Image (cartoon, rainbow, N blue to C red):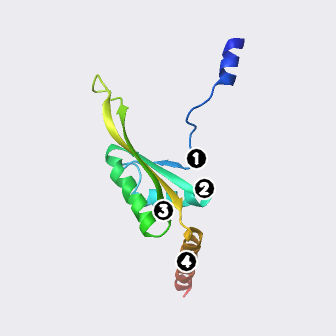
């Protein structure tokens, strides 16, 4: 039993779960869910890592481009690879394309996010004023 305890204590995890990684699916959530999630992650961290397999790669690229075109993010790193994915219907694993895009905040990120919040609050106030009249 001591050997097991010692082995667990000496265990090192080579790739810890990253708190700023978003694994994107093209079927589970709408595109702007990922855009808004990436914005929130960048508010908490200096950068965000978007990751996807197969058909979801187009979604990741679109999310990254929206953030870049709105002046919120800059590309830091793009990594592509293939991974073996186990398919229950086949006897051997199939290879899928994988992409990881690391985006960092722009210098204007906080300023742009504050302006968007102000616009949202002004729109809410205007809507509330219309409802009261």
Report, in whole angstroms, how far the alpha carbon at label 2 lies from the one at label 4.
28 Å
Of tags 1 and 4, which is closer to the observer?
1
User: On residue 45, which mark appears?
Assistant: 2
x and y, in percent, of residue 99 in the image: 39, 46
Badge 1 is on which residue? Answer: 19
Q: Residues within 10 Å of mark 4 (few under 14, many from 20)?
A: few
Please determine whether, in this image, residue 3 is positioned above or below residue 40. above
Quarter-wise, where is residue 68 in the image?
bottom left
Going by the image, does 26 lie left or right of 39?
Answer: left
Which element carries disc 2, helix, strand or loop? loop
Which element carries disc 4, helix, strand or loop? helix
x and y, in percent, of residue 110 in the image: 59, 69
Q: Are marks 1 and 2 in contact (CB under 8 Å)?
A: yes
Which element carries disc 3, helix, strand or loop? strand
Badge 3 is on which residue? Answer: 74
Report, in whole angstroms, how far the alpha carbon at label 2 lies from the one at label 3.
14 Å
Q: Are marks 3 and 1 in contact (CB under 8 Å)?
A: no
Quarter-wise, where is residue 113 in the image?
bottom right
Report, in whole angstroms, how far the alpha carbon at label 3 lies from the one at label 4.
31 Å
x and y, in percent, of residue 88 in the image: 32, 27
């Amino acid at each position: 039993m001591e050997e097991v305890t010692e082995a667990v204590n000496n265990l090192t995890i080579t790739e810890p779960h990253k708190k700023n990684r978003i694994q994107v699916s093209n079927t589970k959530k709408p595109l702007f869910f990922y855009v808004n999630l990436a914005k929130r992650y960048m508010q908490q961290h200096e950068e965000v890592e978007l990751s996807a397999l197969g058909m979801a790669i187009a979604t990741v690229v679109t999310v990254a481009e929206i953030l870049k075109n709105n002046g919120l993010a800059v590309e830091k790193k793009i990594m592509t690879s293939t991974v073996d994915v186990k398919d229950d219907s086949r006897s051997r694993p199939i290879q899928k394309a994988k992409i990881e895009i690391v985006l960092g905040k722009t210098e204007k990120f906080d300023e742009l996010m504050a302006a968007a919040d102000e616009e949202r609050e002004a729109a809410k106030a205007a809507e509330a004023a219309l409802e009261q009249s």
